[in-house]
Image (cartoon, grey):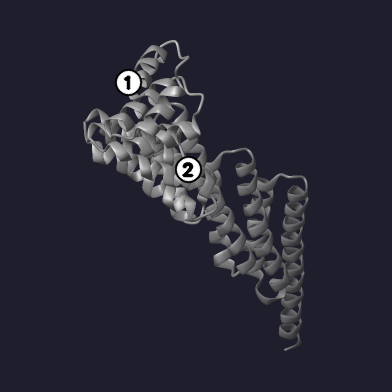
Amino acid sequence: MKKVILFVAALAMTAFTMSAQDINQATEMYNNGAMELQMGNNATALEHFKNALQAGEALGDEAADLVANCKKAICSASLSIAKDLYNSKDFASAIEAFGKAKEYAETYGEAEFVEEAANLQTQTWKLKYNTDAKAALSVKDFATAIENFKKVLEMEPENGNTAIQLAQAYMKSGNLASAIETLNIAKENGQAANASKMLSKIYLTQAQSALKAKQYQQVIDLAMKSNEEGENANAFKLAASAAQKMGKSDECISLYEKYLELAPKAKDASGVICTIAVLYQQAGNKAKAKEYYEKIVNDPQFGATAVEQLKALN
């Protein structure tokens, strides 16, 4: 009976010795991982922590603290690996690594690491889309640029700067309708001045196309839209030309006068003044006709006509 008891006691002592040895080995693995992590060898550290975790879990309750520390360390090391990839601008690999870090954190119930990994992964996606979009623009691959800027805007609907960049890509691709829609989003999100400037330019371009197509009322409507976004002398000039083609003399005069107000030193100013004078003369307003002819009596191109008409009006 004593032999049995002694045998059991010896067996227990052996088990205790083996258990202590196993804990020491697991702890050593963990410490090696901590040292590698401190040295910046994140991948090597991660493997040490994973091995220590496996060893600790095999020991049961007596290694509970070690297991908990290993789980946090695995999350930390995997997150550091992802950050290193991000800093080296390997965004595709970083995205995958942040996803793996998030997976570890979810598995081990480390909510703080889950949130950080998820946020950094989203940030990396946005940066990758922006980088890819700008690279595509540089080689005039507008379709790819648009696709990537749209993805950023989907992730950040209130990002006015991205909306401006997307609108620029649409403009360069010739898709003015989508550019206008996107610029209105930009206006609502802190980019009102830039968006209005671009919208004014788009409407002016459309007005010029309408004039070539002899769609004169559309020219006037688009020119006025351009001026609503920001007064533009050329918009008034286009609208005036369209109004003259439509026989709307009063409107034409008003628009040309606004043009001269904004661009008094324009190269064609004398010609426009002469046109206004003629329109007033045709309308029977001699006083205004004389006023405008007198402005150009010394003009080398229109002076002779002005002098002749002033004689006829006196």
Is residue 150 placed above or below 20 in the rendered structure? above
Q: Can you see residue 133?
A: yes
Residue furthest front in the image: 314
Residue 164 appears in the rendering: no
Q: Quadrant of the C terminus?
A: top left
User: In the image, what residue occupies the spot 48% across and 23% down?
Assistant: 266
Q: Residue at x 42, y 35 (%)?
A: 257
Q: Which residue is mark 2?
A: 230
Residue shown at the point (71%, 84%) measured from the top left = 4
Graded by Cα atoms within 10 Å as few (under 14), some (14 to 19) or many (20 or more), the crowding at tag 1 reads few
Drawn side of residue 241 relative to residue 94, left or right: left
Q: Earlier in the sequence, mark 2 or mark 1?
A: 2
Horizontally, residue 161 falls left or right of residue 303, namely: right
Answer few, some or many: residues within 10 Å of disc 2's Cα (few below 14, many 20 plus, some between 14 and 19): some
Q: Is residue 2 above or below residue 226?
A: below
For this rendering, which residue is in front, 19 or 151?
151
Q: Position of residue 150 (x, y in %)?
A: 41, 47
**Quadrant in the rendering for residue 117:** bottom right
Circles 2 and 1 in contact, beta carbons < 8 Å? no
Q: Position of residue 130 (x, y in %)?
A: 50, 41
Under tag 1, what secondary structure?
helix
Q: CA distance from mark 2 to mark 1?
A: 41 Å
Looking at the rendered image, the quarter that the N terminus falls into is bottom right
- Horizontal side of 306 relative to 18 (left or right) equals left
- Kind of residue indicated by mark 2: Gly
Q: Of residues 260 and 87, which is closer to you in this image? A: 260
> What kind of residue is marked 1?
Ala
Disc assigned to residue 312: 1
Left or right of 250, for residue 26: right
In depth, the one of 94 and 304 nearer the eye is 304
- Which residue is rendered at x = 75% and y = 73% of the image? 16
